[in-house]
Image (cartoon, coloured by chain):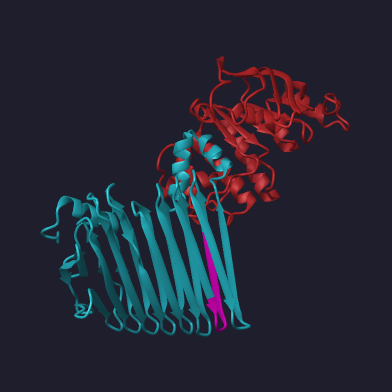
Amino acid sequence: MPFKGLDAEQIDLLKAITGRTEFDEGSAYNLRLNGQGVARSVTENINIVPKTDAPGIDIYIKAGTKNETVHIPVLLSQSGLKETVFNDFHIGDDAVVTIVAGCGINNHGHGDSEHSGIHSFYIGKNAKVKYVEKHYGVGNAGKKVMNPTTYCELGEGSYMEMDTVQISGVDDTSRKTTAVVGRDAKIVVKEKILTDGDQKARTEFSVDLNGENSGAHLVSRSVAKENSSQLFVSDIRGNAPSNGHSECDAIVMDNGRVVAEPRLSANNIDAALIHEAAIGKIAGEQIIKLMTLGLTEKEAEEQIINGFLK
Amino acid sequence: MIEFRNVSYTSEDGNDIIKDVSFKFSERFVVITGPNGSGKSTVARLIAGIIKPTSGRIFIDDKDITDLSVTERAQEGISYGFQQPVRFKGLTVKDLLSLASGQKLTTAEACTLLSKVGLCARDYVGREANASLSGGELKRIEIAMIMARNTRISVFDEPEAGIDLWSFNNLINVFKELHENTQGTIIIISHQERILKLADRIIVIANGVVTADGEGSKLYKEIQTPGCVYYRKGE
């Protein structure tokens, strides 16, 4: 049902990061607005408990939960508000769950608004988690800053997929993702970032493949326009017989800059690690091809970027 | 009708690729052939507007298109199939077919187009048109894109390059069908005997000049003669 008390701009923010303006009745969610939890709903299998010693929540997914979704959006519309929030996810064995997070900042004032989400995932045996996170900013005065830090501990046979998107309006971001992957477990991270203006984005992945037959697959696709800059750092350590792969594809436009710093450490003879990076401008032949279909140069460029970040 | 009127093209490094070429045709299936490096593909690129003549003018149905951009020429009804198809990260085969047809295609519509070029459609519609597809697959998708556009002039630059024999047989059938069922003009840059055989008209280019230009069935036989003089005339 629609949330009471949200103004039109806040509803727009919610829609931008979750694709919806309300959540299904009887579903699990926690809405945080301007530093306060303002709406919460739990289910038989998903419990959300506010922390007592720090801002944030603990989310408990019961073992064996099947195909449930929990939404935990954060909205900041109060200019100058800076917050650090600690959210811990306790995923029971064999659970299959989708977690939709995300942060939207609407900053029309002159103060900088900042949200730092510290997320920790403790994933039980054979559990499967899909984590979706979208960051979005709007407003031209004060800065919109988001610094997500994510720690993932994957138990035996578990699987985690992280889809993170930042495509508009975030002036400064520093994203750190750390994962410790157990036996037969796998983490997949798909990141999409678009920066423009003077925006800066830094993403760091640090993965320890500790369990036998563990795996990691990190894919970053990004576009840096105008005077923006990005740094992609990945560090995968194969400490056991394991497979690790990281891929950084970036398009630079105008005066945009992208730096990729991959690091692979094979600490076990049976660790197989790969890194791929491709950074460059849009290939001229791609633009020409789409122009031969009747698109203008600008339309061709938009199609290529939209497809790249799709 | 397409007309080249005294068209020359000199590359950036000063090589005269096309030298004072003139031709005019209104046949529906025209093959431009000639030895490697003769300037055939340059003619195709000049028609599509990817490069502009150093001198001379190009007309379509008596309209001077020489100064039109690639986009404007596409909007005028010219399609161009690349010799080396372009790969796109992120854009799917269906996306490209939709862009080509100018409307968002349904999966069924995209499948129909792909089936015409011999691709088992459901396997391809949702795939990215990237390095995971072979050169032959991309080539057939390229041809499907041109079919999706259904424009009055379709230019194919060596469509047979990089595809296997089975696909080539299929390609010949596609061109036969296009010849029979479309009203537009098809221009193919090719060396291939079986494509030359389909031509209503053949233009031979050697060393940047037109060395022969005539009815397809007649010129085809002459070209097959060992040491064909038309391939050497421009030297």
- Residue sitting at 62 percent across and 54 percent down? B134
- Residue sitting at 61 percent across and 30 percent down? B186
Percent of width and height locating residue A83: 25, 66
Closest to the observer, B116 or A119 = A119
Percent of width and height locating residue B127: 50, 55
Seen in the picture, residue B137 relative to A3 is either above or below; the reply is above
Q: Quadrant of residue A266?
A: bottom right
Q: Main secondary structure of the magenta part?
A: strand
Percent of width and height locating residue B204: 76, 26
The answer to whether residue B7 is left or right of residue A305 is right
Residue furthest out toward the front: A111
Seen in the picture, residue B122 relative to B145 is either above or below; the reply is below
Q: Is residue B222 magenta?
A: no
Region of the chain picked out in magenta, as a range: A237-248
Q: Colour of chain B?
A: red
The answer to whether residue A4 is left or right of residue B59 is left
Q: Quadrant of residue B117?
A: top right
Q: Quadrant of residue A39?
A: bottom left
Percent of width and height locating residue A13: 24, 54
Any part of residue A101 in sight: no
Q: Colour of chain A?
A: cyan
